[in-house]
Image (spheres, rainbow, N blue to C red):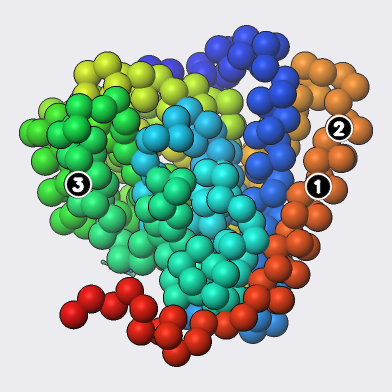
Amino acid sequence: MKKVGKGLALATQTLAIDKERLLDWYYQIVLIRKFENKCDELYHQKRITGVYLHLYSGHEATGVGALAALTKDDHIITAYRDHGLALARGVHPNPIMAEMMGKRTGTSGGKGGSMHLASREHNFWGGYAIVAGHLPLAAGIALKEKYNETKNLVLCFMGDGATNNGYFHESLNLSAVWDLPVIWLIENNFVGMGTRVEDAAGQPELVKRAIAYGMKEGPRVDGQDVVAVYNAVNEAAEYVRKTSKPILMESLTYRYKGHGVSDKQYDAREDLKRELDEWHEKDPITIVRRHLTSNFPDIEPQLDVLDLKADQAVAESVEFADNSPIPDYNDLINNIYV
Ligand SMILES: Cc1ncc(C[n+]2csc(CCOP(=O)(O)OP(=O)(O)O)c2C)c(N)n1
């Protein structure tokens, strides 16, 4: 498996043959960034409501690179930082924005909101607010695929904070005992709410936990570089499909907007401001742009067009959500099992 840095050598070869793909990744990363910025704005205008709004800004390369390595029959499940992954999976921005604004046309009819995006037709199973609560579900979906003798796998994203929850132990252990086809992907942004990884984990190199479960230890990949992430997840997926065994891997990334958009840590702490500035220098957009401009010298105008296209998609999603009805009483009592 490739570690941070090494992936880039291979990445450059991939680039030369796949300009269109790289352009598509650029568009997706920019779309997620712009979508999240708009959500931030709408939240502060109280047009998106709810206790929290967790943005994927900063993590975009991890989501886009990882999902590009899957087939449409594979499954994705994640925690509450889920908007970017829904977009990267190809869910249309309109129903995502409508869900954010609690509208009937949203992915969950407006009843899930920001933390519970899901789309059955995309095998995108959410969107969970209970830290690590989705890990047993990932194992269950993988068990179903194994039982049906398919080659489909489950890609389960989680934050570093999830690795200290009992569900993590139970799910990873069982997946190793039962040889379940899961990629357990830790998005390590180095902090869970306000707790640093090194203050919460005896082994801060989280991927090493795999050893305890007799599971393959995957790479710690540079999560800011879409190509490195794609290559690493692609390789992990090949391993899982070939062996029907799980793998644990880690993507090193950073959340730009704090835990949620009301998080004021960055206003109060100079050290965090410096840390944030350092991560901005390794921004996913800068890196993917660099891949493109260094390989294709005349590409800039095409990137400008994609920027504009992303602006339009976001504006259209807000218009769609604004013009959508709110759920009515029947929607409220629908899908309730007694
Ligand atoms: C079981 C449980 N415990 C505590 C919380 C409160 N909580 C919400 S998010 C969070 C931090 C999780 O951090 P991490 O998994 O690293 O994800 P990140 O926010 O960094 O993406 C905590 C403790 C919760 N939602 N569920």
Q: Are marks 2 and 3 in contact (CB under 8 Å)?
A: no
Q: Which one is in front, 94 or 333?
A: 333
- Which badge, 1 or 2, comes first in the chain's sequence? 2
In the image, is residue 277 above or below residue 23? below
Label 1: element kind: helix
Q: Is residue 84 visible?
A: yes
Residue found at x 67% / y 58%: 35
Label 1 to label 3: alpha-carbon separation = 38 Å
Can you tell which quarter of the image residue 192 is in? Answer: bottom left
Q: Residues within 10 Å of mark 3 (few under 14, many from 20)?
A: some
Q: Please, which residue is most extreme toward the bottom here?
A: 329
Image quadrant of ligand 1 equals bottom left
x, y (%) of residue 206? Answer: 30, 40
Q: Disc 2 designates what residue?
A: 302
Label 2: element kind: helix
x, y (%) of residue 20? Answer: 72, 24
